[in-house]
Amino acid sequence: MSLDPPTYLNSLQNNIRARPIPWEGAVRAGTITENDLKRIKAVDKVRKDQRIQTVEADRDAYRSLLLGGHQGKSVLESAAKRVDVIQYMLVLASDLINGWCSWMTSDSDPSRTLTVFDVDVPSLASALFEHQSPYKPFLPLLSHSTNPEDAIPLLTSSFLANLISTAQTDSSKSDSQTNEALPKLYNYLSTLTKSQDSGLQDIAVQEYSALLRTKKARELFWKQRQDTLNPLIDILRAAAGAGRDSDSTMWSGGASIRSATEAGLSGG
């Protein structure tokens, strides 16, 4: 069984893909460079095989486009005042790095959930990790707004969740920068689980699922449990119809869900 990516997020991304962006005007205003625009148009709204071929032929250029380099800033940094450009670039970055992601139950163990990725350009993800600061342009965007429905943090968290999950599959890439980025992403996702909007809660739950793949990731999650775990338990309580002060033995009995969760998270 697979779980489709959250409907709200899919709808948001499709809406942004369909928006016209006045790219030439952005170049004239100095928001992006001619080279930036050339690289964007080469991979935007083209066939997947053409996109792969284009990026594979110039991985360094596309790494610089997203992360910056000796030739200049990341397009996300240079276009900081252009919300439309940032949103569009976040969706395009997700299309390049993430492709699509689904969650499936294991055939051998139905209680185990597996995260499955179909990445458009796998080598680009590897190229990003060769940069000295692979998360730098993205992390500040998580605090772009305190509104949980703001598109920029939502799109950023989706991109980062899949990028970090990719890093976790390769021990050589699960370095200190990933461990520093995770608490910031957890902090943002906690604002979604605290929302009363079930669509936003779904996004957070599925991204947590993608992130909690290593012992270190689970340790960091547990360290922030007041903001990460407790809202998830509240969601379960609400789904079960049990309020915080309920006398139900499901929540007040000897078999505490918090105790059970603690045992699971502290495991290897």
Image: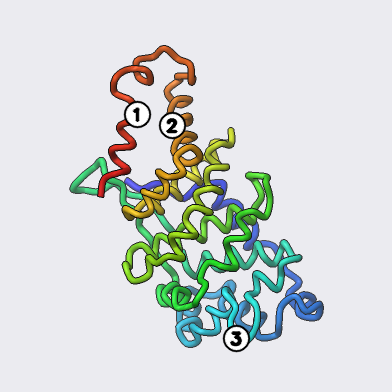
Report x, y in % for residue 20.
72, 66
Q: Residue at x 54, y 55 (%)?
A: 157
User: Which quadrant of the rendered structure holds the N terminus?
Assistant: top left
Q: Is residue 266 above or below residue 211?
A: above
Q: Earlier in the sequence, mark 2 or mark 3?
A: 3
Q: Toward the viewer: 19 or 222?
A: 222
* CB-based contact (under 8 Å), mark 1 and mark 3: no
Considering the numbered disc 1 on the image, is that residue within a helix, a strand or a loop?
A: helix
Considering the numbered disc 3 on the image, is that residue within a helix, a strand or a loop?
A: loop
Considering the numbered disc 2 on the image, is that residue within a helix, a strand or a loop?
A: helix
In the picture of the structure, the residue carrying the numbered disc 2 is 233
In the picture of the structure, the residue carrying the numbered disc 3 is 70
For badge 2, the amino acid type reads Ile
For badge 1, the amino acid type reads Ile
Report x, y in % for residue 231.
49, 34
For badge 3, the amino acid type reads His
* CB-based contact (under 8 Å), mark 1 and mark 2: yes
Q: CA distance from mark 1 to mark 2?
A: 8 Å
Q: Is residue 144 above or below residue 231?
A: below
Q: Residue at x 46, y 65 (%)?
A: 177
Q: Residue at x 60, y 86 (%)?
A: 70
Q: Earlier in the sequence, mark 1 or mark 2?
A: 2
Q: Toward the viewer: 202 or 217?
A: 217
In the picture of the structure, the residue carrying the numbered disc 1 is 257
